Image (cartoon, rainbow, N blue to C red):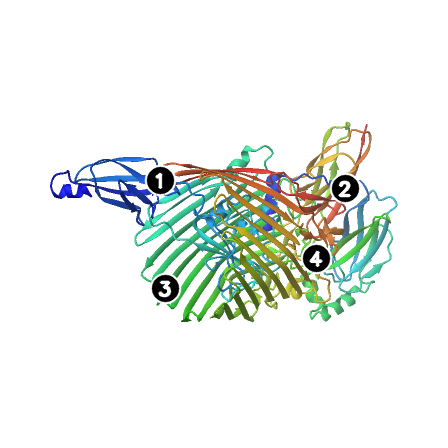
Amino acid sequence: MRRTSLILLAFLLGCADDLPPRALLDGYRVLGIAAEPPEARVDDAVAVTVADALAEGARYAWSLCLLSYGADAEYACEDEPIPLPATGPALTLDLAALGVPDRLDALARAQGSDLDAWLAAGHPLWLVLQSGPPDAPVRTVKRVTLRSAPANHNPRLDRLEVPADVQADATIELAVTAGGEETYTDVTGATAEEVLLFTWYTTGGTLDPHRTAGPDRRVKLHLPATPGPVQVFVTVRDGRGGFAVAEATLVVP
Amino acid sequence: MWSGWLVLLGLAAPMGRVDGVVTERGTRRPVAGLVLRLADEETATDEAGHFQFEAVPPGVARLVVDDPDYTVPAVELRVLPGATTAVELRVERTSLAGTGVRVVGRRARVEVVERHLDADTIRTQPGTGGDPLKVVQSMPGAARVAFDGGDLILRGGGNTQAFIEGHPILSAFHFGGWRSVISASLIDDLAIVPGNQATRYGRGVGGVVDVKLRRPAEDGLHGYAEADFFDAGAFVEGPLGPGSFALGARRSYVDGLLPLLDDAPAFTTAPRYYDAEGLYDVRLGAHRLRLFSVFSSDAIAQVLEEPDENDASLRDGYAIETYFVSTQIAWDAAFSDAVRHHLSLAVLDARDQVAVGAGFDLDLDYQLITAREELTVDVVDADAWGLRLRGGLDLEVGIGAYRVTAPAIPGAGGLATPLGVAKPHFAEDDGAYFGHPAAWVEAELRLGDLTLTPGLRVDHDTLVDDTAVQPRLQARYALTRATALSAGVGLFAENVDFAAGLPDFGNPDLDMQRSAQASLGVSHQVTAALKADLTGYYKRITGLIVTDPAEQLANRGEGRAYGLEVLLKHDRDGHFHGWLAYTLSRSEQRVAPDAPFAPFDHDQTHNLTLVAGWRFDHRWELGARWRYVTGDPYTAIDRATFDADADAFVPGAGRYNGARLGAFHQLDLRVDRHWIFDDWRLTTYLEARNAYNRANPEGVEYAYDYRHQQTVSGLPILPSFGLRGTF
């Protein structure tokens, strides 16, 4: 409840925020990681691609963790992580070739369970990516959920609409067309429908807002006063591991 | 004398009689013991303010009030022969002392240290807006809380418990720290026991704050209406049947004022709170019955225009609605001069509904029943020695139903992570319960100047099936009439929080946290008004509940706190009253036996409070409070991991509480002005919190990726105005 009072205070007094905005891309940034499919069987092959911005000169190092302590322990791996040979922004995760079924079965038994039970409930594998410039690498984690009957699919990002003609120091509207919402059973056991979450980025100007959700799929971009190219990105997540990204480039005259 | 003979002889007119009553202007309360003179006669008012002059020569007579504490305009009476002249006098109290301002650091017979604050001191304390529980932070051993919050933290770590007459207040503040749910109106005394409490208190390894209720007025109907920047309230009390009653209520109007402000956030339910309290107190011979009830309700809801920058699960908005009603009935009986009995029962009914974005949803409907049975027997009460036995049962039962979707509960050493990355748990129950039975006994043995109080308390926690046996000993020795030593040593145990014992959110295999505490103090009455107290203490906590990657929560941690408390207080003996409270302390914990110690969240090495009040006359008073407190420790974040699914950066902690905020210092000022009318009085106050507008560091805010940070400052200068009409 103390947190509640601090939230209240922050709202009532207003926070002077001089910190850099998240929507402005001013250096290397990981926007997300797409796994196709986002849910897989224990011996499937999964195509993985990182969506990153301003990635010139970036380096990539991947590993796979079969059992993680999660966010509270900074995603530390409970067992020995499996290094992956890929050094670029994409890789194919061949679970059978990596021996995941056997290793996961051993882990499940060591914890007093069995692989079938884990797969019935859904078991997350954790991809760990170290990427970016060597002097300022970014650590990213991505779940790939293994199930005996995978159900989830990535959402669709059909089109990112940007105006054809833009002016410096002007405000334009960006819009995205997306779909692929699915129904699922939530943690309470109730049937729920996915709410798509959109995150918007720009390499110049200011975005308002930075995030939208559900049917809100438009944002305003106030373009910089100086001429030059401006890249805009939008990512979409279904909240269950599904991800897609789209980008466009504007040229401010 | 001659006139008497003349009357007997029938040669003079018969004498007259004067019958009157004296009440105080502004309060209408009777004034007892007031000396009055009429002609050559002198008399004094009785308890009801009545006076009589039986034989007064007819004619014009001058009634004189002879008391330096009161002023009254000269009264000339026309006394008629053989008749009674009725007089009703209103006198105005001008004394600067004795109006109830009392700040004491007295040592009770049992507790090693038990400090007290009375209602007038609470009401006029600068910087608190008259909040009865926030005043606790001006006393030794109490930590300052950021943003003027109201959390009660005594002597470092451990749960400090707040009680009303020995029964717990689970939500002592509106919105968790904004303002106390209890108003100062019904408080007779606020007892603060920072540690080493006697066996009557249990279930916590921190200190105790116990609100003692006063008896409502029995001399007529009284009350007040008041308003300040945040809320308005009314209170009425008076005799009713064989006893007396009090009723009060208060409601905030922040929800009404916010729309008037430019750029004010748009709330679905603007923040509002209200509370009400009622008391009935009756004495029937050697028995006393008291019925008390308090009600509180808070609500706030807001729709967020966009999801949080770093936590997409914080979208849509949040809504908080809580209420509780607590009712207690107490029976005190004196079976003889040597045997006294106390039985009280309290029933609390509460509901908390909290929804934050898509990641946290709580609906908790619960009842807490507490009962206290206490018996005191004076076995021997001789001049040379005495023996008093006390014992009792202390029962707490909680029942309720909950429906919650939330992450696991962080323990000590845990770092708050975005809701969107935490693994959500769901639990639902329609019949959960826990029981906390306890029994205690103590013997107060007085041997001349030495008083020893050995005691034993046994607590059981059914939630985790753990029993704690806690022997304790208090001692007091009067070195001289002015100087006394006191000491205490004992074991303490703290019940496992209900949610922490649930399998989904915590760990049902937890044990109660244990603590060993010792303290030693000396007090010296320097002058009639000036008293000094010095107390040293040490506290060790074992089985501290900490975050555990495998079990969520575990008793792997330990803590310790030690320090020195100084209280130098000057009671009002004229214009001035005030005190100096200083605590030099260290409180630290470690999350595993082999881990290094780190400070507790409110470890404040130096905590100095200076309070001064100057009463210019009986209408004007100026108060000031100045505080200097070492900045709180915090865990600096020096790295982050991007969770690509949650679209959130998850912080990586540096050394736990290894960094520290800058020092806090602040001056609060308050001016009170009283207007006294015949039947009522109007009091206004103007308060300036943070009078020299210092930007006190209260926290650290990070950019989305935790690579940049800035200090969050506390409240700027905050003027406040309030008024109260009392009758």
**Residue closest to the far left:** B10
Above or below, B178 relative to B196: above
Q: Which quadrant holds the N terminus of chain B? A: top left
Q: Are dots 3 and 1 on a single chain?
A: yes
Q: Is residue B50 visible?
A: yes
Looking at the rendered structure, the kind of residue marked 4 is Asp
The residue indicated by pointer 3 is B333
Mark toward the viewer: 4 or 2: 4
SS at mark 3 in the image: strand
The number of numbered badges drawn on the structure is 4
Query: Disc 3 versus disc 4: distance between alpha carbons?
Result: 55 Å
Above or below, B362 relative to B28: below
Mark toward the viewer: 3 or 1: 1
The residue indicated by pointer 4 is A72
Q: Neighbour class for label 2 at 10 Å: few (<14), some, many (≥20)?
A: some
Percent position of residue A91, x then y:
83, 53
Looking at the rendered structure, the kind of residue marked 2 is Ala
Mark toward the viewer: 3 or 4: 3
Above or below, A163 relative to B670: above
Q: Neighbour class for label 3 at 10 Å: few (<14), some, many (≥20)?
A: some
Mark toward the viewer: 4 or 1: 1
The residue indicated by pointer 2 is A246
